[in-house]
Image: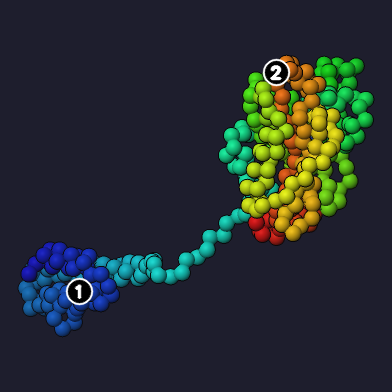
Amino acid sequence: MDIETIREKAKNDIRDANDAQACEVVRVRYLGRKDGELTNILKSLKDMSLEEKRKFGVGANELKIELNELIENKLKELSTKKERHLDVTKPGKKVALGHLHPLTHIDKQIRDIFSSINFTIVDGPELEDEYHNFDALNIPADHPARDMWDTFWIKQKTKEDGNKHIGKFLMRTHTSPMQIRYMETHKPPFQILVPGRTFRYEATDASHEINFYQVEGLMVGPDVTLANFKFVIETFFKKFFGKELEFRYRPSYFPFVEPGVELDIRLPGGKWLEVMGAGMVHRNVFDAVKYERREVQGFAFGMGLDRLAMIKYGIPDIRLFYSGDARFTEQF
Ligand code: PHE
């Protein structure tokens, strides 16, 4: 048999060998000391004429080296394949996932519930001007109620320094300025929800932070009443806590609503908890956005997202939300 035929056959055999044992069979078949096909040729070299020796000798020896190499490589390939072998019955490795912040969870739940009852979610600026945060909400500069909102004022140039802006800038103390911004650019009827970050210049303790989150609600139309507010907000809280709740409405004061109320809830077996301020939009607010006060009416409410999260998850201290401590977030 000639060298070329042996080479072709051996290469095919090596390619088809699919484990170490099969490789060994191939090796013995061609290179086995006793009766290997190539070995036999090499053995017969000694009986050949010098000319034949020249003809066969070099090629046969080269093939021997080549086949040894091919088998070696094949064995390596087979053994790495074995390492990569996938055992589908093995229990899976858990992929470590990050955690959403509890306020993110609460924010999402609130958006989902209000979206499901047809509220539009809108966003507003954190840097506000005095007009939208206060004046248009019926809180003029000399109004004692301004003390309800300890304010971070933004340092800015005075008029004398060439500042053309009429009002002062501040970090919004509540999400209510978005009532004004939305009404300035939209016509009723509508119902909106405005989640957002708010700021107050006060001492921090377990229930006060200088920055926190609020959710504002506003519904305006030709005949929106407090009864609509009750229905909307009770529907929301029942869905949010997934439990039957008791509600208590107390009269309260906010310059931009009349009448104003505060809402308390009680979870089964629990204490009464104050959860939000609300009321019917004040006519001065409608004046500020140039709505015809006899043609529209509506309700507004504002609640603290942090507080709701604390109630829902039993978190004792508002400062934990902003601690950046992973041991806290990991629990949600
Ligand atoms: N903006 C009020 C607050 O921050 C809450 C509120 C909103 C009250 C809307 C009434 C109506 O305290």
Residue located at (15% from left, 73% from top): 38
Disc on res. 26: 1
Residue indicated by mark 2: 295
Secondary structure of the residue carrying tag 2 is loop
Foreground disc of the pair 2, 1 = 2
- Identify the mark nearer the N-term, 2 or 1: 1
- Residue sitting nearer the eye, 188 or 140: 188
Is 89 displayed left or right of 154 in the figure? left
Amino acid type, callout 1? Val
- Residue sitting nearer the eye, 147 or 157: 147
Q: CA distance from mark 2 to mark 1?
A: 96 Å
| Colouring | rainbow
Residue located at (83% from left, 18% from top): 166
Disc on res. 168: none
Residue at the outermost bottom position? 34
Instruction: Please provide percent x and percent y for residue 184.
Output: 70, 20
Residue located at (83% from left, 38% from top): 251
Q: Quadrant of the C terminus?
A: bottom right
